[in-house]
Image (spheres, rainbow, N blue to C red):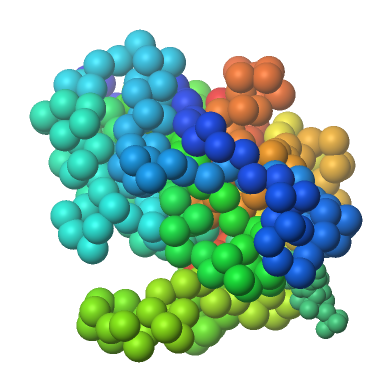
């Protein structure tokens, strides 16, 4: 280690895992009062993936983690830190990240979860970034993983059409150098006063194990869609500008934007407000819907595999989610 050069958090590998089962809009319209045209027009979603009974968040996360480690040419034993961002954990405790550690046999790692719902991956990335840049850890595995299909009310057409299951993972490696590379900065925010917008109202701590809460649908996602839509566009613009200004960049400097895949119209509106060419904005929402904390790493992995993101590109991540939470990150790939 050279004590005069700053530490960086470089991207060493990325991977994703999507369950096999596809649920199309047409299949949904057989079950609830909705239609393919409405879903496509209002959200951009055409289909989503649904986890099998055996696939919990840790199972999806482990698969994605394995792929990211293999892309990075690293072994699980090299990992110092595993962070899993999830709002659909396997169980209340232990942390889903501990199950991932066991599954991967990452025996040296410290493992914990982060709950920032859709913003989870950017929050987790931000934590890993600090550990690498202070020199404390060398290798971090950051994963977003969700089985949203278990917490959506399949009778509520305003939410069940939106969400899907999946996992995405990124391996970060500490390096040293004067040329800035990898995660340049992350910017994360919360506003608990807006916690009513998207929430699961019931929970072990609040309702106990309650059949009444089950009957009332309190363990499912509740969302004020329209109000969330408006605040989402505003926060995405605000935090993206914050990230760009912090690094002395303008929107023209950005090569690829990888936004949270919540709604195609939200993504388009945010890009328009930022005056970013829509051709620079990557989206795969049509295939996977909103996979919450997994959406950004799944999209990043696909954009990288397809050659949309190239070495040296400046990549902007932007996200908003339940909490309210929101964040952005800039990566020199
Ligand atoms: O990832 C975390 C952040 N989450 C988000 O950012 C989600 C943000 N919100 C959204 O994406 C949108 O608000 C939705 C897609 C959820 C809803 O779109 P909208 O354009 O805001 O629609 P709306 O809620 O204002 O509803 C418009 C109409 C209503 O009917 P009326 O009252 O105008 O007769 C709804 O009942 O659309 C109706 N509607 C549906 N119709 C067919 C709502 N859901 C459906 C549906 N199929 N699935």
Percent across and percent down for residue 87 are 40, 60
Residue 19 position (above or below residue 191): above
Residue lying farthest to the top in this orientation: 73
Residue 274 position (above or below residue 217): above
Q: Nearer the viewer, residue 268 or 56?
A: 56
Count of numbered badges drawn on the protein: 0
Judged left or right of residue 316, residue 41 is right
Residue 275 position (above or below residue 238): above
- Residue in the picture at 37% in, 84% down: 213
- Residue in the picture at 23% in, 27% down: 104
- Residue in the picture at 25% in, 37% down: 100
Q: Is residue 11 visible?
A: no
Residue 220 position (above or below residue 128): below
Q: Nearer the viewer, residue 285 or 245?
A: 285
Judged left or right of residue 164, residue 61 is left
Q: Quadrant of ligand 1?
A: bottom right
Percent across and percent down for residue 71 are 43, 15
Q: Nearer the viewer, residue 240 or 214?
A: 214
């Amino acid at each position: 280690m050279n004590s005069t050069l700053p530490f960086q958090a470089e991207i060493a590998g990325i991977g994703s895992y999507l369950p096999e089962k596809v649920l199309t809009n047409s299949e949904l319209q057989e079950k609830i009062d909705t239609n393919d045209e409405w879903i496509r027009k209002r959200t951009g979603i055409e289909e989503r993936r649904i986890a099998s009974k055996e696939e919990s968040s840790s199972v999806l996360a482990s698969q994605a983690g394995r792929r990211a480690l293999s892309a990075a040419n690293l072994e699980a034993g090299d990992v110092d830190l595993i962070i899993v961002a999830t709002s659909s954990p396997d169980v209340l405790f232990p942390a889903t990240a501990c199950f991932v550690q066991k599954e991967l046999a990452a025996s040296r790692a410290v493992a914990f979860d982060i709950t920032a719902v859709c913003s989870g991956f950017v929050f987790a990335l931000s934590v890993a970034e600090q550990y690498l840049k202070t020199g404390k850890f060398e290798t971090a595995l950051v994963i977003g993983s969700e089985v949203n299909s278990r917490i959506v009310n399949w009778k509520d057409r305003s939410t069940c059409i939106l969400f899907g299951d999946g996992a995405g993972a990124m391996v970060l490696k500490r390096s040293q150098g004067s040329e800035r590379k990898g995660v340049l900065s992350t910017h994360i925010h919360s506003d608990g006063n807006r916690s009513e917008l998207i929430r699961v109202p019931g929970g072990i701590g609040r309702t106990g194990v309650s059949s009444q809460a089950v009957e009332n649908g309190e363990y499912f996602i509740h969302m004020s869609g329209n109000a969330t839509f408006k605040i989402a566009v505003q926060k995405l613009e605000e935090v993206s500008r914050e990230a760009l200004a912090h690094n002395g960049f303008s929107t023209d400097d950005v090569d690829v934007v990888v936004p949270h895949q919540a709604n195609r119209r939200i993504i388009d509106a945010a890009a328009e407000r930022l005056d970013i060419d829509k051709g620079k904005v990557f989206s795969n929402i049509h295939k996977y819907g909103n996979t919450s904390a997994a959406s950004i790493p799944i999209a990043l992995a696909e954009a990288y595999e397809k050659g949309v993101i190239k070495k040296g590109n400046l990549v902007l991540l932007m996200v908003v989610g339940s909490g309210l939470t929101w964040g952005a990150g800039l990566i020199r790939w």
